[in-house]
């Protein structure tokens, strides 16, 4: 069939537009659409109904939205977790943003890396994957400087050796969000030293005021970060920051440190205090112009939300940290977010599990599938609460994960 005839020959739209009592001119065009069209002499001269000339449309045979329009479909939970859109392999259109959970090369991580004389150790098993994106965006929840005290003892004052910067380079980090409740544990000197260390090694920072802007083949990404742990997020500053980023970038990425720890659903924790409801803050960020919202801090990965066609990720869990005391705190997800032009069209998540107090390793296929199902179920629970569309069918929430061996499997 010729493309020029598609508006008339395919679908019910032409029938609705043109009506039923059509004359000879329409009959000729419709007859031409049939593979077994009668010769002109056999075409009747009296008006016939459209249904007598053309079989009822088969809507299952319709081309997809993307094929019909050349544009990707509107983002939804269903499309994220059960994708049908295949992004074209065209580097002029596609940009990828990879995001990790919290990186805290402090305490036990710092101790064991120092004992091994190997500050690449935490990053080696995953580096080939994490650096394989246009931009790798990390959550760095620890200052890094020479002379950081080395101790595996429980402490909530975090720092890591400056040599961990080589690990961040190994994993391909391009931007580090430092807006969190531990980055300032060693005061202004620790903040300044770490920011200078990052910049001299080609890593920009978000969360210190200026927008971190990276140009990826003509598309500019702007990164800003805000901490909501220990204090409320300044929403006036948030709105102003998004407006400033909007002026400098085509895609605005906002990362938050927020929410109650050790929960599968985003919620406030007024006892810490972490007073903001992440859902409210995430919605505000989208309403004010963010293109994607990244969440971290709860130390468990959580579900995601599609709000007004934009993605809000509430928590990616831990990436590099020594929280071996529960299976949930050993787990995290690495998110890869794919943009077609400036529109987010796909997401993939790969689950990791930490071994030996600080080294994340990709899960086996079975455990990875369970983590993915957990994310989908958590996303559907949130969507149900917010009266938003869920995936179909809604999966069951898997039981709490069983504690894995402390040491990584060989090979």
Image (cartoon, rainbow, N blue to C red):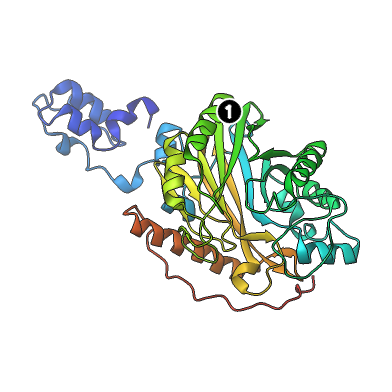
* Rendering coords of residue 29 (x, y %): 25, 25
Residue 100 seen = yes
Q: How many marks?
A: 1
Q: Residue at x 50, y 48 (%)?
A: 232
Left or right: residue 389 compared with residue 47? right
Residue 341 seen = no
Name the image quarter holding residue 408: bottom right
Q: Is residue 195 above or below residue 392?
A: above
Q: Quadrant of the N terminus?
A: top left
Viewer-side residue, 252 vs 235: 235
Q: Residue at x 91, y 61 (%)?
A: 117
* Rendering coords of residue 214 (x, y %): 67, 32
Left or right: residue 130 compared with residue 301? right
Q: Is residue 390 above or below residue 329?
A: above
Q: Quadrant of the C terminus?
A: bottom right
Q: Is residue 8 above or below residue 103?
A: above
Left or right: residue 189 compared with residue 393? right
Q: Which residue is mark 1?
A: 249
SS at mark 1?
A: loop
Q: Residue at x 87, y 54 (%)?
A: 147
Left or right: residue 196 compared with residue 314? right
* Rendering coords of residue 299 (x, y %): 60, 62
Q: Is residue 140 above or below residue 221?
A: below
* Rendering coords of residue 383 (x, y %): 38, 56
Q: Residue at x 16, y 34 (%)?
A: 50
Viewer-side residue, 313 vs 345: 313
């Amino acid at each position: 069939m010729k493309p020029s005839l598609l508006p008339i020959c395919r679908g019910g739209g032409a029938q609705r537009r043109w009506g039923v009592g059509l004359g000879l001119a329409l009959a000729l065009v419709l007859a031409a659409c049939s593979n077994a069209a009668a010769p002109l002499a056999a075409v009747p001269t009296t008006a016939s109904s459209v249904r007598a000339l053309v079989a009822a449309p088969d809507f299952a045979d319709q081309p997809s939205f993307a094929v019909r329009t050349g544009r990707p479909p509107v983002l939804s939970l269903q499309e994220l977790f059960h994708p049908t859109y295949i992004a074209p392999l065209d580097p002029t259109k596609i940009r990828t943003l990879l995001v990790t959970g919290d990186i805290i090369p402090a305490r036990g991580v710092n101790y064991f890396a120092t004992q091994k004389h190997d500050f690449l150790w935490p990053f080696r098993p995953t580096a080939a994957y994490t650096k394989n994106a246009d931009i790798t965006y990390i959550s760095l929840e620890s200052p890094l400087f020479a002379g950081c005290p080395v101790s595996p003892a429980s402490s909530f004052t975090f720092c890591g050796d400056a040599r961990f910067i080589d690990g961040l380079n190994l994993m391909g980090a391009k931007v580090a969000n430092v807006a969190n409740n531990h980055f300032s544990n060693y005061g202004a000197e620790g903040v300044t030293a770490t920011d200078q260390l990052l910049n001299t090694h080609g890593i920009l920072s978000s969360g210190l005021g200026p927008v971190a802007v990276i140009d990826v083949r003509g598309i500019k990404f702007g990164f800003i970060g805000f901490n909501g742990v220990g204090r409320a997020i300044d929403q006036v500053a948030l709105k102003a920051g998004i407006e400033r980023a909007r002026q400098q970038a085509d895609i605005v990425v906002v990362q938050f440190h927020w929410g109650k720890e050790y929960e599968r659903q985003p919620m406030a924790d007024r006892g810490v205090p972490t007073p903001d409801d992440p859902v409210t803050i995430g919605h505000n960020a989208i309403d004010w112009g963010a293109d994607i919202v990244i969440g971290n801090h709860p130390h468990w990965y959580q579900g995601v939300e599609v709000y007004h066609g934009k993605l809000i990720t509430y928590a990616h869990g831990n990436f590099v940290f020594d929280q071996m005391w529960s299976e949930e705190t050993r787990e995290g997800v690495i998110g890869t977010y794919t943009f077609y032009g400036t529109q987010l069209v796909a997401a993939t998540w790969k689950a990791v599990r930490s071994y030996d107090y600080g080294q994340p390793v990709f899960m086996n296929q079975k455990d990875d599938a369970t983590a993915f199902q957990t994310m989908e179920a958590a996303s559907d629970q949130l969507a149900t609460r917010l009266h938003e569309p869920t995936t179909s069918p809604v999966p069951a929430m898997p039981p709490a994960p069983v504690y894995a061996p402390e040491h990584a499997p060989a090979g």
